[in-house]
Image: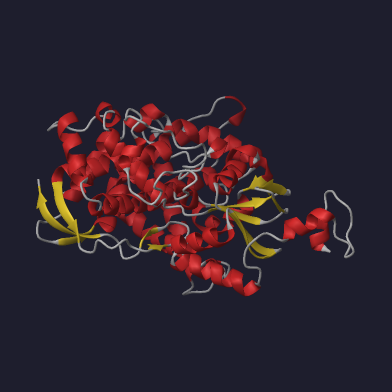
Amino acid sequence: VREREQFAPTGNLDARGFRSRTIAAVSLPGPRSPLALLRFLRDLDVDAHATLDHLHARYGAVVGVGRWPLQVVLLLGRDGNELVLSRQPDAFEWRRAMRPLIPVDGDTALVVTDGPEHDRRRRLVQPAFHKRRIDGYLDLMTGEADAAIDQLTPGSVADIHAVFRAAIRRTVVLALFGTHLQGRADEIGDLLQPAFDFLNLPPLRQQLKLPFPGTAYRAARQARRAVDRVVDEEVARRAAERSEGGDDVLAMLLAPGDGDDGRLGPQEIRDQVVSLIAAGYDTTSAAMAWTVHRAARTPGVWDRLRAELAAEVGDRPLAVEDVRRLPYLAGVVQESLRLDPPGVVAPRSTVRPVEVDGHRIGRRTLVFYSAYATGRDPACWPDPDVFKPERWDTAAPGYEAPPRHAFVPFGGGARRCLGFAFATLELQAMLARLVQRVDLELVDPTPPQPRGIATSAPSGGVPVRVLDRR
């Protein structure tokens, strides 16, 4: 009965009482059994890249795993990205699909909000990510990169993922709170870690939201409450000192609003701040790990990066104008995000039936589009599995712009990630300082397996041997 109601907008009834278009709707290519869905969810956690590659090669760009209502639909082509991000974005909702993020990001965070409330909150948060303000954080980014590099001892082995995860966390906390909470950046990261651990559990375990002592869900909720106290203390301090003004993001969120939007309430401020911390360093540090691994294992890339930096920057501190004149550096970051995006899949839930590539997907279906799959699609990219930073150089002879919606590591459309410019500049600045100052080699040049669903990072980190440091 549910399937008849779900997939019966047009067409004649067949002998079973289904309308003719129902057959196409419920017969998406892909493994159909409930056991196949369980295997898919398990394999996505173990090795998301291999899982998506296998399904894409076997079934194509639209894959249904399981049967409705226990079904996941994978959109693994550019048309699927376009459908979700720009062609029919109003056919999808975020909250139902992103519900596992609520214990960490909060009930009013942008990523779990739809409709007018999302639009209002985004308008209030967006000024904090104006390009001019982001450019002003460059010195902070390079300073934290240098502090991290200073810890690297020649002859030692270090995990670049862990080293720069801490540096990126400090950068995000300083950008959000200013210098007053500078000394608490690592504390905030430690407080939030149980929440990240919960988000990266296999999907089935995430559904067991058991509030008992010792469970991952209970630890995530306690982590969120602990960080809320830090935010509340800082908001109260600023209110007592009447110090709402300032250059950090929290000052922008506390500033009086104009027009009908007003300003964010206390819970909204907490949720935006915590979600910005979470997204700002968990995903960016994973992207930094993938980028360093790619640059270090691909012959000639490290030397070419260093030569470009020497020619354009020399011994001067890195400036925003320099970053604009470093096309190979930008290409290394873009190419890494193409091949190894931290967000391998992004979920949405349909609010009405939609069609893509001749297939029909019903209402209230969980849909994943994939920046990873389209980043490796030979229909979109020449030599898709080859790491070629020069493909992004618009001044290079024969340059071809990537097809629209083929490169979506930050989403797209009206709900493109607010922090995409901040994250991109941060990756470029920190990679530039690492290349300028450090000679290193990978302990194991074998491509690492990805691990994690909410954020995909190299399993086991990125261990490197430090050869020299300047």
- Determine whether 36 is above or below 309 in the image: below
Q: What's the residue at 28%, 54% (across, down)?
A: 293
271 horizontally vs 283: left or right: right
Q: How many marks?
A: 0
116 horizontally vs 346: left or right: right
Between residue 452 and residue 240, name the one nearer to us: 452
Between residue 56 and residue 161, name the one nearer to us: 56
Q: What's the residue at 59%, 60% (across, down)?
A: 59
Percent x, y for residue 141? 27, 40
Q: Is residue 307 visible?
A: yes
43 horizontally vs 60: left or right: left
- Determine whether 410 is above or below 197 in the image: above
259 horizontally vs 144: left or right: right
Q: Which corner quadrant holds the C terminus?
A: top left
Q: Which corner quadrant holds the N terminus?
A: bottom right
Q: Is residue 7 visible?
A: no
Percent x, y for residue 156? 13, 61
Between residue 388 and residue 238, name the one nearer to us: 388
The color scheme shown is secondary structure
Between residue 60 and residue 360, name the one nearer to us: 60
Q: What's the residue at 39%, 42% (across, down)?
A: 237
Percent x, y for residue 18? 85, 60
Percent x, y for residue 427? 31, 43
